[in-house]
Image: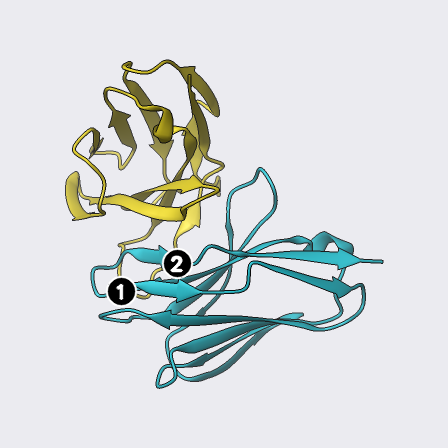
Amino acid sequence: KAGVTQTPRYLIKTRGQQVTLSCSPISGHRSVSWYQQTPGQGLQFLFEYFSETQRNKGNFPGRFSGRQFSNSRSEMNVSTLELGDSALYLCASSLEGLRTDTQYFGPGTRLTVL
Amino acid sequence: GQNIDQPTEMTATEGAIVQINCTYQTSGFNGLFWYQQHAGEAPTFLSYNVLDGLEEKGRFSSFLSRSKGYSYLLLKELQMKDSASYLCAARTGRRALTFGSGTRLQVQP
């Protein structure tokens, strides 16, 4: 079974631009979570989607948004990029997003904002 | 709030045993995960504890004490490929994972 895939793997943008990242979960997984990883803050939870609905949200500004499609694929968007948005963005999928479900991570998208 | 602490760095010798500790203070605790992350790669799942006690999986074992807010990951027969960051993550009532900053383990010959 294929793992979680994310595209693109690397991205360079400039301040003020917007960016869209894509995540395809493991087949059969319906929950998709997004995380931001930086050297200073570690892994921080952005949001979780299940059945095309945002079910859970972390403490990030409204510039960060996402959505999920009927095939469970998910996208996240960051508008008005800031230098501090440079990070590795990781997507993780799980079966139902239940408390006992294990999350499996994709390889990440490394975003650099210049 | 949510708080998870783990040592920043550890060094151990090939063939030895190392224990990586993690303490947590979270609301609505629903289990403790350990992930391994090699540089430039995604975290990979190692173990999950929701009840007190030891879970053994090959060379890796994980322990949880809910009353003490404490967990550890035990790595036996260390290999050079075990050099990586080890992330402790607590699942809260809202299903999100709160991660510690990670422990960078360096295995030396």
Q: Residue A100: percent from the left, percent from the top?
A: 32, 66
Residue A102 numbered mark, or none? 2
Q: Residue B61: percent from the left, percent from the top?
A: 58, 74
How many marks overall? 2
Question: In the figure, the cyan chain has which letter?
Answer: B
Label 2 element class: loop
Colour scheme in use: by chain
Q: Residue B3: percent from the left, percent from the top?
A: 34, 64
Tell me the amino acid under the disc marked 1: Thr
| Chain that bears disc 1 | B
From the image, state the color of chain A. Answer: yellow
B33 relative to B19 in the view: left or right? left
Looking at the rendered image, the quarter that the N terminus of chain B falls into is bottom left
Near mark 2 (Cα within 10 A), the count class, few <14, some 14-19 or many ≥20, is some
Judging depth in this view, the residue of B105 and B30 nearest the camera is B105
Near mark 1 (Cα within 10 A), the count class, few <14, some 14-19 or many ≥20, is some
Residue A60 numbered mark, or none? none
Label 1 element class: loop
Q: Quadrant of residue B12?
A: bottom right
Tell me what residue is drawn at x 41 percent, y 84 percent. B52
A18 relative to B18 in the view: left or right? left
Q: Which residue is mark 1?
A: B92
